[in-house]
Image: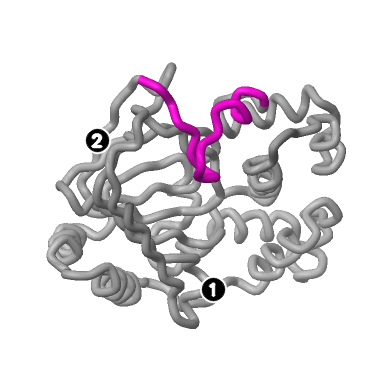
Amino acid sequence: MIYVHRAPQPPLDRFIETFWYWQADAPGHAKDTIMASGRLGVLVNLNRDYLNWYDGDGFARNNGLKGIALCGCQTTAFAIDAHQPHMMGAQFRAGGAYPFFAPPAREFVDVHLSLADVWGADAERLHHRLVQAPTPQDKFEILESALIAAAPREFERHPAVALALARFHRAPHRTSVRAVADEAEVSHKKFIRLFTEEVGFTPKLYLRVQRFQRVLRAIHLAPAVDWCDVVERFGYYDQSHFIREFGEFSGLSPTKYFASRGPYLQHVPLEA
């Protein structure tokens, strides 16, 4: 297996978390479930001009895309082929994709689409360049330059959105949406609109998904879990509330996830 990643240079590091490159053999299972997330990603198949993902009952429905695509912020789980031998991409931070694509981020929620649907023929030319570039670092530079060149907006967040993301990250249990709107000196309604346009989710949905993600990080590598402690520590009303939310965002019960979890945080191996 070869895995290489690179953090972008300022000011892009405030919007893009990482560029990554992956080359590996078959892992021994058929599909991976991908958990709900508040972040958009660019995916590039360096092996062929095709990407696919699965949804529906048992993740049985196969959906096809061109070989360079966008995976928007997701509110539910989906699945991908476990064996994708030669891939690369960019992972944006929460709200980080907004400067790079003309439609507002809310239009990318629960969406997978070929980059050509947004960038036209430029996406196909970019795909060819990425396939032909000799090294991972060359590929990263090409993708970074393409994103910069295509960006229709300045590399800035609205101050209210920047404030909200900072507050939600620092103290998610103790920060209310209305309090952030008041601190940002915008109306509650305007704050929700601004946040949804740049991040994709409403503030309340974003906080719910981020709480789920914090639970994943807490239990992913744990040898054992006290579920009652998880419910209390992460601010769920009760165990039923926790199980319902976990199932909504993962497609699995907490105990099923814990028994099936693999080596990667966002991926759960699925047998054929």
Residue drawn at point x = 45 percent, y = 31 percent? 269
Q: Which residue is mark 1?
A: 14
- Cα separation, mark 2 vs mark 1, equals 31 Å
**Residue 150 seen anywhere in this rendered image of the structure:** no
For residue 205, side relative to residue 16 (left or right): right
Q: Quadrant of residue 41?
A: bottom left
**As rendered, which of 130 and 175 lies closer to the eye?**
130
Q: Which of these two is toward me, 222 or 6? A: 222
Give the number of callouts.
2
Q: Secondary structure at mark 2?
A: strand
The stretch of residues the image draws in magenta is 255-272
Q: Amino acid at mark 2?
A: Gly
- Tell me residue 119's x, y (percent): 25, 60
The residue under label 2 is: 64
- How many residues crowd around disc 2 within 10 Å: few (fewer than 14), some, or many (20 or more)? few
Can residue 262 be seen at all in this image of the molecule?
A: yes
Using the rendered view, name the quadrant where residue 30 is placed: top left
Q: Residue at x 87, y 38 (%)?
A: 232
Q: Is residue 175 left or right of residue 88?
A: right
- Residue 25 part of the magenta-drawn span: no
Numbered disc 1: secondary structure: helix
**Spot occupied by residue 223 in the image (x, y as percentages of width and height):** 69, 37
Q: What's the mark number on residue 58?
A: none
- Whichever of callouts 2 and 1 sits on the residue coming sooner in the sequence is 1
Q: Is 260 one of the magenta-colored residues?
A: yes
